[in-house]
Image (spheres, rainbow, N blue to C red):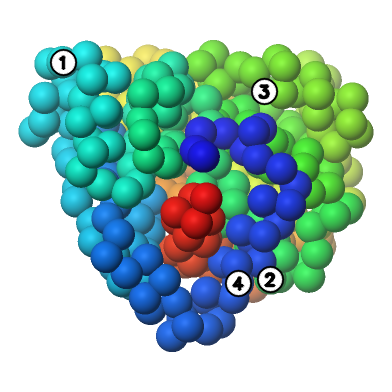
Amino acid sequence: MHLVTLKNWSETEILETVENGIKIKNYPEKYKHAAGGLSLALLFQKTSTRTRCAGEIGIVQLGGYVHYLDWRTTNFGLADLSDEIRVLSAYVDVILARFLKHADICEAAEAASVPMINGCCDRYHPTQALGDLMTIQEHIGRLDGVKVCFIGVHNNVCNSLIAAGMKVGLEVTVIAPEINPAAEDGELLSEAEKKGCYKAISTDVDHSVLALQEVISESDVVYTDTWIDMEFFTDPNFAEERESRINKMLPYQLNNTLLKGLNCKIMHCLPAHRGYEISGELLDDPRSIIFHQSENRLYSMKAILLHLLNN
């Protein structure tokens, strides 16, 4: 069993993982030896803070071992991906991979003889979504019927939020003037729309602050993410596209003016660009559950590891 995308996980599997994440958080001593003697390999093509720490620290706190592999210091970039994954599978019990391309995580999962976890690719970020569900459950007390408004660039995080929400009853509304081309998943959006758990708000009309407030005023959660992938934010070769996107997206920034008088929870998967997709003061606003959300990545990752290892 793998975690490549939550599209292939059942409602029961998702809800049990969320519930177990909360149990692990509240009763860590009970899980100190849950993965005793088992090993996790982390194979990363790009930078990471939360996903890497959640995997490394999580498996150790469960009594297991961790082996971090920087893509650039291995033969993965030189050899056939499937061959190298078969070799790595013989050494460890589970693999957490952060690849640039979704096709590569699919190929790796096909070749692996141990569970593969997608630690983020250009189309999905399922471990983030499971941590998000855990956070919503903790702070709102339920998942079914919770209204989430995702505002910004439609990306891999947005896709996984929709895929997760479709299974557990979240109602996800997306206000996205732009979609990352690599994140396009018409099949997912069509299915979610038919089930009534996803809708996209047109950005072709005038979205003044008042209009945006009207859209998000009925939401329990408002969620945003970076407008520009982290690896491109300071890349001089991406400077022109960066400025164009910032100018286009600034009217959709989460800030005190937009959220004035609204009693919604504020979420962001981090890392954030303060002053861009979200104003700095909102990260520390009483309505913000952003750093709880970040902390919960550890407990939800532990729950993911145990679920896969037990299967």
Q: Are marks 1 and 3 in contact (CB under 8 Å)?
A: no
Tag 3 residue: 177
Dividing the picture into quadrants, the one containing residue 230 is top left
Q: Image height check: is 143 above or below 204?
A: below
First of labels 4, 1 by sequence position: 4
Q: Which residue type carries mark 1?
A: Ala
How packed mark 4 is, by other alpha carbons closer than 10 Å (few <14, some 14-19, many 20 or more), is many
Q: Nearer the viewer, residue 302 or 267?
A: 302
Q: Which residue type carries mark 2?
A: Glu
Q: Position of residue 264 (x, y in %)?
A: 77, 60
Any mark on residue 22, and which? 4
Residue at 70% over, 15% down: 186
Of discs 3 and 2, which sits in the foreground?
A: 2
Any mark on residue 79, and which? 1
Q: Which residue type carries mark 3?
A: Pro
Of discs 2 and 4, which sits in the foreground?
A: 4
How packed mark 3 is, by other alpha carbons closer than 10 Å (few <14, some 14-19, many 20 or more), is some
How packed mark 2 is, by other alpha carbons closer than 10 Å (few <14, some 14-19, many 20 or more), is some
**Quick one: SS at disc 1?**
loop
Tag 2 residue: 138
**Quick one: SS at disc 2?**
helix
